[in-house]
Image: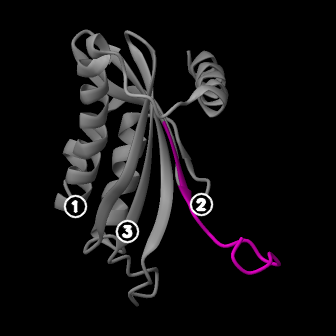
Amino acid sequence: MRNSMLAATAALIATVTTTMAADPPPPDRAAEVAAVKGVGAALVDDWNRHDMKDFGSLFADDAQFVNVIGLWWHSRAEIQKAHEALHATRMRTSHLVATESAVHLLGPDAAVLLQRWQLTGDTGIDGATLPMRRGIMTLVIVKEGSRWQIASAQNTDLVPLPNLPPGQ
């Protein structure tokens, strides 16, 4: 199951990167788009309340999550445990803001949500407050029954590349 989910996730992300458009969804799909965006909004809200139990409940039991430094968690339980540890330490005063989001509906029961974010209040491992961070999170969200939940997440810090000309 895990290998097929990973393969499906990779295929979905590849499809999204080549087909995502800024056009609004058809009116009959607006409810699905709103529900998917609602999952992203709940993730931000749970983060800011530092409620990692609610945060964890957004994920499927067999969800996958790759964080900004490449750590890979293989279940809802692992995802929740790792985030509980983060929010007990360096993220305990953090504040997350979603600055942009885009939904790509893949069918009636699957979607990809890309969400740009900004994070303040990260105290780092030494306890010193770090500058604001920016990134993009890609969430594969699936509908199980009437509930949308995260099947896969990839979080990426935006960092300047070395040796680029100014302004690039």
Q: Residue at x 40, y 58 (%)?
A: 117
Image quarter of the C terminus: bottom right
Q: CA distance from mark 3 to mark 1?
A: 10 Å
Q: Residue at x 58, y 52 (%)?
A: 71
Residue annotated with mark 2: 69
Percent x, y for residue 153? 48, 39
Residue placed farthest to the bottom in the image?
A: 128
Please give the range of residues in magenta. 153-168
Percent x, y for residue 150? 38, 31
Mark 1: give few (<14), some (14-19) or many (20+) Cα within 10 Å: some
The three-letter amino acid code for the residue at tag 1 is: Asn
Q: CA distance from mark 2 to mark 1?
A: 21 Å
102 magenta-colored: no
Q: Residue at x 62, y 69 (%)?
A: 159
Percent x, y for residue 57? 25, 35
The three-letter amino acid code for the residue at tag 3 is: Leu
Mark 3: give few (<14), some (14-19) or many (20+) Cα within 10 Å: some
The three-letter amino acid code for the residue at tag 2 is: Ile
Foreground mark, 2 or 1, reads 1
Residue annotated with mark 1: 48
Is residue 162 at all visible to an observer of this figure? yes
Q: Nearer the viewer, residue 55 or 156?
A: 156
Residue annotated with mark 3: 119
> In the visual, does 38 lie left or right of 136?
left
Q: Nearer the viewer, residue 105 or 87?
A: 105
Most prominent secondary structure in the magenta stretch?
Answer: loop
